[in-house]
Amino acid sequence: MKSASHWRFPSVAVALARATLALLATTAGGVARATAQAPNLAKVIDAYIDPFVATNNFSGQLLVVRGNKVIYERQLGWSDRETKRPMSPESELHIASISTQFTAAAIMRLIDQKKLTLETRVSEIVPEVRGAERMTIRNLLEQRSGISDINSRADYTELLQHHHTPASLVAIVAGDSLRFAPGTRYLHEEHSASNVLALIIERRSGLPFARAMRALVFGPAGMRFTGADDDSVSSHVLLARGYDPSAVYAVAPTTPIHWSAKSGNGSIYSTVRDEARWMRALFHGGLLSASSRAAIVDSAGTPFGYGWFRRPNKRFGEFAYSMSGRAPGFASYVIYLPREDLAVIAFSNVYSSATADIGTDIAAMTLGLPVAPIALSIHPIAPDTLGVDGARFTFPADFYQPNATLAFHVIAGEMALDWPSGDRSPIIPLDRDHAIDRSYWEPIAITRDATGRATAISYDRFTGTRAPDAAP
């Protein structure tokens, strides 16, 4: 899925009554630590994040670590809304695509044990994959394998309703033709490549995937509240329940899935504290050999690999490592700035791409960089203020859905955006000319003619022009 961009609507103040913060559930220990260590920063971050929580756009754990010092930590919202179980430091949240960091780490541990090399041909271990003789472990780790992607299948939603193993997932795509010759292109995100890596981990370790991950990574890294969900942990008391956005500000329990269907690419659950332990071990050594660690943190390598985006960041003026994840009911984001030795981790049990903006904004606040607030309020403006009810806008061929025509509708007193795929996004109005697509946390800006009629909209970096109004 697309990731949220950095954006703000200047000069719009956050108007939110403190009484609404009764929705929050914060552990005293986490706040005390943050307040004692950085009281002014804590107040700034609190004021920024509270509206996200009060409007049901974030619920989870936040952690800011600089060097080896925790400078902000907070748990917000509910781990389980139905039973009123508050979020705690030990609440375990699914982290979706951030899981690939740990799949890669397990592979590098096997390389350190001389059971693999980066140049090992996939055909030596998983010969059933078509074209595996041309494919290396490095190709899989760098998203350059060309394997047909399981997440793109028309029956993928149905697939998530059944238990799987890495072998059964690989079998689904093993006979498909490669999309391109291995190593010749980069394509984010190759979910099936991670399924293959999970199967390689099983076959080289001699253990089922979940046990192998515990033995190779989580145990040695001291990650007590992290594991691979193989469908045997659904009743785990510490596991947070996931929620999806419902209309503009509500949430509803997500449709349960079999997390085993995401083995290798999205089945890991964790806490922000455990993620921080892992990041410390990775960026400062201690878990992997020097050569394996170097392969992951290589700033001259591909822009995506080993579970990380690795590229210069204009906002911070330095090289940055980041990764986001979204899966039914959950969203996550991590960013690490090596020059500042700063890590920000945001795990949420609300399915929203807001975590990417939250993580980067908090990193900016920590460094004293400007951050303009968003006008999130439990009292949103009326949707008809936007003046686009019934309007349709057509986007170019390079849009997320090529040549898509998106349609706005007011439904039950709230604004929604309909996609050609059949998806419907709740729209949060901010002012007369600005809104947010809540599903993808993308900005929408409306362009009008002299009469005030909407003639175009910008969505992220794309512009859609108004299509002829549909016949009544």
Image (spheres, grey):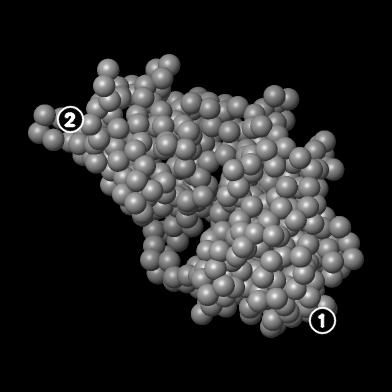
Residue 433 falls left or right of residue 220:
left
> Looking at the picture, how far across and down is residue 199, in whole percent?
78, 62
Residue at the extreme right: 206
Residue type, label 1: Lys
Residues at discs 2 and 1 in contact (Cβ within 8 Å) = no
Q: Position of residue 346 (x, y in %)?
A: 58, 50
Which residue is found at the position 57% from the left and 28% from the top? 251
Tell me where residue 102 sits by quadrant: bottom right
Give the vertical position of 94 relative to 171 (above or below): above
Q: Amino acid at mark 2?
A: Arg
Q: CA distance from mark 2 to mark 1?
A: 66 Å
Figure check: 458 above or below 241 = below
x, y (%) of residue 248?
Answer: 46, 27
- Kindly identify the residue that appears in the image at 28 percent across and 43 percent down: 464
Q: Which mark is residue 114?
A: 1
Determine whether the residue tagged by mark 2 lies in a helix, strand or loop.
loop
Indicate which disc residue 453 carries: 2
Q: Is residue 223 visible?
A: no
> Is residue 471 something that shows in the picture?
yes
In the image, is residue 139 above or below residue 103?
below
Quadrant in the rendering for residue 64: bottom right
Mark 1 lies on a secondary structure that is loop
Q: Nearer the viewer, residue 245 or 138?
A: 138
Which numbered circle lies on residue 469?
Answer: none
Quadrant placement of the C terminus: top left
Q: Who comes first in sequence, dot 2 or dot 1? A: 1
Position of 145 with respect to 468 (left or right) is right
Relative placement, left or right, of 400 versus 46 is left
Q: Residue at x 64, y 29 (%)?
A: 253
